[in-house]
Amino acid sequence: MATLIISVLLALACIYGVYSYIRKLRYGGGCCGEHEGAVKKVKVADRDKTHYPYETVLTIDGMTCSNCVRRVENALNQLDGVWAQVDLSSRKAAVRMKQALSEDTLRDAVRAAGYIVLSIQGD
């Protein structure tokens, strides 16, 4: 009888583990986006660096995973004439712009995504 109970408990634990793994794959996981689908990346059509004469580097606080990186990149890439690439390890976003944008515009875009700009270093 004890063997049957232990076998049932082990089977339930295995079923729960598989369920949790499938749920994480389907709905994302990690710090942000645990209960929502993975964020789709906003792709920039023009990836020619020579078309972006202005460049600035933002230091961003609050990013902890690749989902955070995607959210910040998307927020910046949705601005007209902007191409941003974010590095999680350095917490910096390299922002290329076709026309100069104000620091407030960049800060507001990052703030709307849920993060904080600590510093801005212009070219």
Image (tube, grey):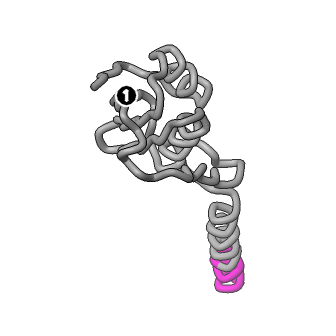
Quarter of the image with the C terminus in it? top left
- Per the picture, the main secondary structure of the magenta-coloured stretch is helix
Picture layout, residue 8 above or below residue 78: below
Q: Residue at x 48, y 44 (%)?
A: 69
Magenta-colored stretch includes residue 3? yes
Q: Would you say 35 lies left or right of 118 here? A: right
Taking the image as drawn, is residue 7 in sight?
yes
Expressed as whole percent of the image width and height from the top left, the position of residue 71 reads 56, 41
* Closer-to-camera residue (79/30): 79
- x then y, percent, for residue 29: 59, 53
Looking at the image, residue 96 sits to the left or right of residue 30; the answer is left
Residue at which label 1 appears: 58
Identify the residue at image location x=33%, y=30%.
57
Residue at image point 66% right, 64% down: 20
Residue 14, compared with residue 61, is above or below; it is: below
Residue 31 visible in the current orientation: no
Which residues make up the magenta segment? 1-10
Q: Amino acid at mark 1?
A: Leu
Label 1: few (<14), some or many (≥20) within 10 Å?
Answer: many
Q: Is residue 28 magenta?
A: no
Q: Is residue 21 above or below residue 10?
A: above
Residue 91 percent location from the top left of the image: 35, 36
Taking 54 as reference, is 9 left or right? right
Element under disc 1: strand
Q: Quadrant of residue 114?
A: top right
Q: Quadrant of residue 112?
A: top right
Task: Return the x and y of residue 30 as percentages of the image width and height.
Answer: 54, 49
Q: Quadrant of the N terminus?
A: bottom right
